[in-house]
Amino acid sequence: MRYLLALALGCMTLLAQVVQESFARDPGPLDFIRGEGFEQAILQALTGDSLVGMDTQGRLVPRLAERWERKGDVLRLFLRQDARFVDGSPVRPEDALWTMQTLQNDPKASPTKRGILEGLRVRVRSGVLELSGARPPERLLRELIQVPIAKAGHADQGCGPFSLRMQGGEWHLAARSHFLHPAIPGLRFRLIADEQALLQNLQKGWLSIGVPPSRRGLKPPPSHREIRQPLHAQLLVWSRAGVGPLGCLERWRGEAIPDSFFGGQARPSRGLFPESLGFPVRHLGDRVEAPAQGTRWEILFTAGDEPVGKFLLALRERAKREGVLLEPRPVEAAVLFERLTRGDFQLACAVNVFEPHPWSVLDLLTPKGGMNFAGWRHPKLASLLPRLTETRTRAWDELQVIWAEAPTSLPLLDYLGGVWVDRRLEVTPSALGLYLSTPGAAGWKWQP
């Protein structure tokens, strides 16, 4: 009886050491080629490895590629010898070649990854993966963080620190032999789509990690602590009605709500480009004329996004004080994206997660940029782009200056990444979030 009791207690301890998490949406099957979305990205980060990683300090670190070098206009990556897929087979440069070329050629491949690999030439030569294209090497390396490598011909097989199996509608991830040496035995994800149910699970300690709803005054239970991580996520508003509405919103965004409005999950933005990417705060200033009394602006936003809806209502009340009619209009996400793409809007806002490097703002400015919905252009841009070769150069300041002359988008909110974490679990926040940095979840530890 004593032996059985000890065995049962041992099993309970092991179960408690598995990190309990949740998904708000079903990520779908694990697919390193066609998988897209936040939840899918988490699964891929846990079960796959990219060629390079980023540590919690924002520095590039080796991952599948143990080292890299630049030879002329070619970036050469040397893969490590101890990496293995879940079936035990070694990771080869040919697997990286297949992954990248399939992402480039499959029309149903992840739009995010296809955009990263657009215009990139990939080949294997003498056992070394070679990449070449027009992008600066540092930018390319930072973008490759988002491209985990799959086994050639098997889009559902990765080589990451955890293996995945589905059981009873849940996602179970178990630690495997891996060069990152995961210190936790695994993770379990359940589907919890309802905010109130998620909050209850966190307050009762049934989840080890979770993002609480954006509500004022929420505090973690005694079993958890709150950590903040500087995410590159912002609520952006685009304008096809000129710079005037953006000038007003720039003034109003910090006045409409108190800092505690989102319960520590977000705060009003301060500048024109994300501060989290290293950009200094710059303003439009007084160059924008005040709107005429009775001016009406319609602003589209995603239906069902309750926190954003409340924020826009607060902005509406602030606009009334200057005789402006700001009318929030909720539309379905697909409709919002379609109207943004067609340019069919006065004002429209949506949450955007920037890639973890300053080049990601170019999507707002370049002629074919994925976020240049209002067709922004400037005669000096073409001469500036070739000078953006490193993260910290004077050219970035010049870029901000020409953008500030008449931007077509403005950040309204910075999302802070407030997360409740079990006090016994040691995690390290980063600008990529808890999961996407290196070593990510593989570096978490349970306190004894």
Image: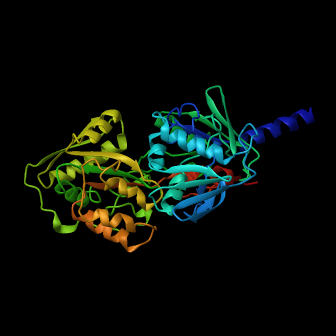
Q: Nearer the viewer, residue 276 or 201?
A: 276
Quarter of the image with the N terminus in it: top right
In this rendering, position of residue 258 left or right of residue 191 = left
> Residue placed farthest to the bottom in the image?
394
Asked if 219 appears above or below 359 in the picture, the reply is above
Quarter of the image with the C terminus in it: bottom right
Q: Nearer the viewer, residue 395 or 217?
A: 395
In this rendering, position of residue 387 left or right of residue 7 = left
| Residue at 24% across, 49% down | 374
In this rendering, position of residue 278 left or right of residue 404 = right
Q: Position of residue 376 (x, y in %)?
A: 25, 54
> Residue placed farthest to the front in the image?
126
> Residue placed farthest to the top in the image?
168
Q: Quadrant of residue 257?
A: bottom left
Q: Position of residue 387 (x, y in %)?
A: 38, 68
Q: Is residue 257 visible?
A: no
| Residue at 86% across, 36% down | 7
Count of residue discs: 0
In this rendering, position of residue 96 left or right of residue 219 = right
> Residue placed farthest to the left in the image?
293
Q: Position of residue 121 (x, y in %)?
A: 51, 50
Q: What kind of colouring is applied to the model shown? A: rainbow
Asked if 269 appears above or below 239 in the picture, the reply is below
Q: Quadrant of residue 98?
A: top right
Q: Is residue 121 visible?
A: yes
